[in-house]
Each structure stands twice: as structure tokens, then as C-alpha cells.
Amino acid sequence: MSVAAHVVLLTESVTSRAWVNVGSFLLGLLLSVWIPVALVSLRWPTARLNLPIVVAVTLSTLGEFIALLQVPEVRTGSYLSFLIMVALWFGLLPLRLSVPASVMGFVGFALLVASRPVHDLNLLAYLGCTTVVIAMASSFGQQITTVQEEAMTFQQESLTDPLTGLPNRRGMLEYLHATHARLLRGEHPGFTLVLLDLDHFKLVNDTRGHMVGDAVLRALGPAVRQLLRSDMMLCRWGGEEFLLLITCTTAQQAQAITGRLNGVPLRLPDPLPEVTFSAGAVLAHEADSVAGLLDLADRRLYAAKRAGRRQLRWDTQGGSSLVN
């Protein structure tokens, strides 16, 4: 639509030989064509277009104002063009740039208006007040945006384990409660919880150092994802414990997926040591609540430890069969 409008304006200007506006309309046409090309074909992020848009519109508006040196009076439309340019500055530029640009722009425009034989100082005063209102509104809006972004960052950090970058216990619990509620409403196909605990992890810290231990914890997430290759969510539950939520519809599917974990050592990038883990697994329908599922997974994890570690258990007794 913008392209069509600029084509019409450019055609009318050429037809009527109004050469003063041809440059501005041509620049607007080029900008209207360039924006969708940059967004769709070049896949530029929207923020990357801010500066080119500001520069193009500013140059186009300055071209319009330079042409006013040949007329006896600055028309109302030029006041509107100035306000549009100021609003664009405050909308796309940080305040440290938009404020001085607006001040210098207003001073320049005021000198232009005052230099014309016919001028309306009252209208110029209204323009100044409107510019201040735009600046205040923009400043308030940017402050709100900054606060919202900081709040979102804080919330994300509060749900993320700083060492591994995985969701932490709080983040996983929120996700788990939401998923379980969807399951009860019939909106989720089902899931399996697997509580993992690295075997003899203290020995890694004691013999290889805590730096290596931290590296092992960071590498565990990618290693588990590489091993399972399924729809899953992994979190650091605490210490060397990790909780895995795997989306699966049947007990047989759960057994097939978790079977890739049973007794399998995790091969981490060199020079990190190979690690094994004990695990307890539970199907979503085996308990009525999230707390019940976690308690059952925890008891099965300790059954795996008592049975010699390096295994995944579906029971708390002596067998390892899956509960259907």
C-alpha cells in the first residue's frame, strides 16, 4: 500500500512538474520497497531497520524543508511533517539520540518559520509544546518497556540454573504442574518422569576438581538430548540430580525411550570423564498428583542405588519391569 501511494504521489509530482517534492517521494518509494525486501528476503531483524528508516525519513523531510526557502510562508502540512519526523525519532531511536535531535530540529525549523515573510508564532509555540509532549510520552513508554524487559529477564533467570543453563527446580515444577493439569483435562497425550542422579559424582569433584565437575554438569544436558532424541524437557533438580520429562503416549513407548538410558554411560566431550547414573522412572498415571509422581520417582531412584547403581528402575522392589 505504501509503495502504491508513493508511486501515485511521484507520478502526480512529475505530471504537474512539482519537482520540489520528487526527491522526497522517490526516497519514500525506495524505502517502501526496501523494508519488505530486508524483512522477508534478507531476514533482517526489525530493530536493524530502525536507523535506515530514521535516516531516510529525516533526509526526505529535510528535502521538503529546504524547498520552503523559496516560499513566503510555511504551511501547516510542513508542521505536521516535522511532528511525524520527531515521533519517528522518539519511536525508533534511544532517548540519548532522539532528545538532542529533536531540540536541534525544532530550533532549525523555528528559524526557518521565523525567516519567512509571513509566519505564525502561535502555531510555532503549539509545535514546541506538542514536541515536548511527544518526548515525555516516549520517555515514559521507554521506561515502561525497560522495566518490562528487566522483569522478564529476572523471571527467566529465576527459572534457570545459572551453571547449566537448564530450567531449575522452580521452573520445572511450574512446567510440570501445568503439564499435569493439561493431562487431567485430556489436553496432553501423557508423559514419563525420570529422576537421574550421577553415580559417584563426589569422586569426580575430589579427584578431578570442581572445575571439571562443573563442566560435567554443563555437558550432561546435551549428552542426554543426543541419547534420547525425543520430545523432552530436562532440568537440574539439585546438586547432581536431574529431572527428565518425556512426552509419550503409551507405557511401551516410555519403556522404549527410557531403555536408551538404562545402564548406558554418558560419553561427554574430551577431556571430561565418562559418567554413569542411577534413575527412577514413573508414568504420569501412576499417581494422582505431581507430588505423588515425584515421590515415587525418588523412591525408585534410591532402589536403583541400592541395587548397585548404573541402572534405571520402574519399581521400588527387586524387579525392573514397567508398571502398565
Image: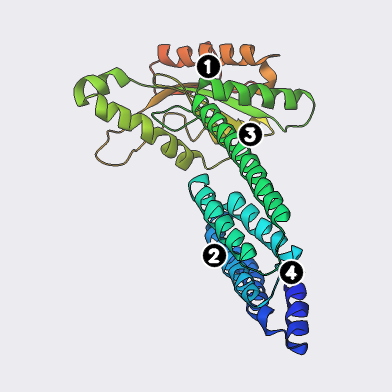
Residue 53 position (above or below residue 24): above
* Foreground: disc 2 or disc 3: 2
Percent x, y for residue 104? Answer: 52, 56
- Foreground residue, 44 or 121? 121
Q: Which residue is mark 2?
A: 55
Quadrant assignment, res 274: top left
Q: Which residue is mark 3?
A: 247
Q: CA distance from mark 2 to mark 3?
A: 50 Å
Amino acid of disc 4: Ser
Amino acid of disc 3: Thr
Q: Which residue is mark 1?
A: 319
Label 3 sits on a secondary structure element that is strand
Q: CA distance from mark 3 to mark 1?
A: 24 Å
Dot 2 surroundings within 10 Å: few (below 14), some, or many (20 or more)?
A: few
* Foreground: disc 3 or disc 1: 3
Quadrant assignment, res 277: top left
Q: CA distance from mark 2 to mark 4?
A: 18 Å
Dot 1 surroundings within 10 Å: few (below 14), some, or many (20 or more)?
A: few
